[in-house]
Image (cartoon, grey):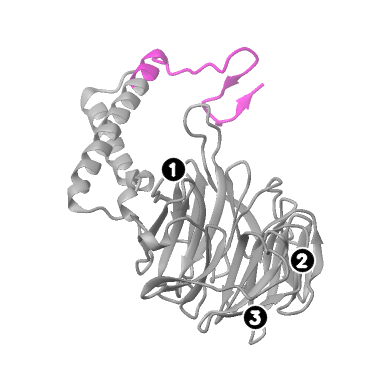
Amino acid sequence: MALPLPQRAGLSLALALALLASAPLAAAAATWWSPAPRGLSRLSAVASSAAGSTLAIRQGSAEVYSWQPARLRSLRLPSTSSDPGRAVAVAAAGGLGVAAFSTGMVLEVHLASRRSAWLPRVSGGVQSLALGGGAVPDLALATRRGLLFARLGSVPSMVAPGEATAVQAPPAQGRSWLALVGGRVWRQKGGAWAPFPGAPFLGLGARALAQLADGVVLVGARSGMVWRQLGGRWRPAFQVLPYGGLGGVPELTSMVAVGSSAAYLGTDGFGTLLTPDGGYTWYSAAPTAEVRGLAAVGPVEAREARGLVLALAGDGAVYTHRLQALPGPPTYPPSDQLAQLLGTGAVVLVAALLTVVGLSLLVRRGGTGRLSSGEGGSLSGTGGEVVR
């Protein structure tokens, strides 16, 4: 039986309003980012430091970056008998920074004075670094052969065999070290490294990992699924969908935590996604479609996060976003806001009208009040169960 015209109109309006209310979740925020100053172009990696200085890699060389005021100063490497190769990964904590080079050489840097010294060489091809701890911090190195761990200055030892793609130091006191090894999440607990109980298999090569200061762990699988862990339980949080027709699910390239409950996810196809509430809600916040890496610069782990988020694009461009207090959802300047609202509203209204038309046709076809489930079964209208 078809719905009366007033009821169909009311349903159409209700659907339009509901969809319009949720539209900002899918809104792209290209104007939320701005191109980085010329001095920050061609960055390939950046590591944050609570001390206000940051170690950066630009065109294969290690440099020290100060986020306030924003400036990048070249770092003179100490003499060595062999060429260290190109810089491939960096880490920073407090007033110290560490850079790994393609030959396996590792450099320790005092960020304030820019004094540096070579550490024991490692093998296996470093892909990620993390530095954290006390006055003499611990150093973790994710290599293609496995995860290495040691006190800074000591010879690191293998703690997890397999290709290690990402590692993160504890963001707050009482949190654990985390790493991605062989497509699985590992953590350090009680001084020993072991696979994280209940963590899903993410696929070989997965590298998106973030641990928030409030204890939430977010990881990205090769399938585009983002998993969330809190209180010992792992649950799916968000699925990144295919793009560009047959383009497939974009690669989840990186993830960085800011503040106590927010994180940015970099993708190769959908730009950057933001969750301000530990994985419950996601916003599109893309400066460009292809984001190869993310970095947070400045005191981003403070209760009120401050500093910058840098998005490293595939073409070598660098985009910056200055953190808001939460940080909050994307905001638009007045010149773009009206066009954004009108465009979103038009799409929502068309979708709502098509939905109502489809529902009307469905109700008309089922005018007898009976719905067939095909050969072999029917739906019972009394108990709500399927009769076979």
Q: Which residue is mark 2?
A: 122
Write the residue at 53% across / 16% down. 372
Crowding around mark 2 (Cα neighbors within 10 Å: few <14, some 14 to 19, many 20+) is some
Q: Which residue is mark 3?
A: 133
Q: Find out whether the residues at labels 2 and 3 contact each other: C-beta distance under 8 Å.
A: no
Q: Which residues are magenta?
A: 360-388
Q: Which residue is mark 1?
A: 289
> Residue 60 appears at what percent x and percent y?
57, 59
Write the residue at 42% across / 16% down. 366
Magenta stretch holds residue 372: yes
Of 17 and 25, the residue lying toward us: 25
Above or below, 151 relative to 160: below
Q: Find out whether the residues at labels 1 and 3 contact each other: C-beta distance under 8 Å.
A: no
Task: Look at the image and tell me in which quarter the N terminus lies.
Answer: top left
Q: Which amino acid lies under the numbered mark 2 shown in the image of this protein?
A: Val
Magenta stretch holds residue 314: no
Instruction: Give the tally of numbered discs.
Output: 3
Write the residue at 69% across / 70% down. 106
Of 41 and 126, the residue lying toward us: 41
Residue 377 horizontal side relative to residue 212, left or right: right
Residue 23 horizontal side relative to residue 175, left or right: left
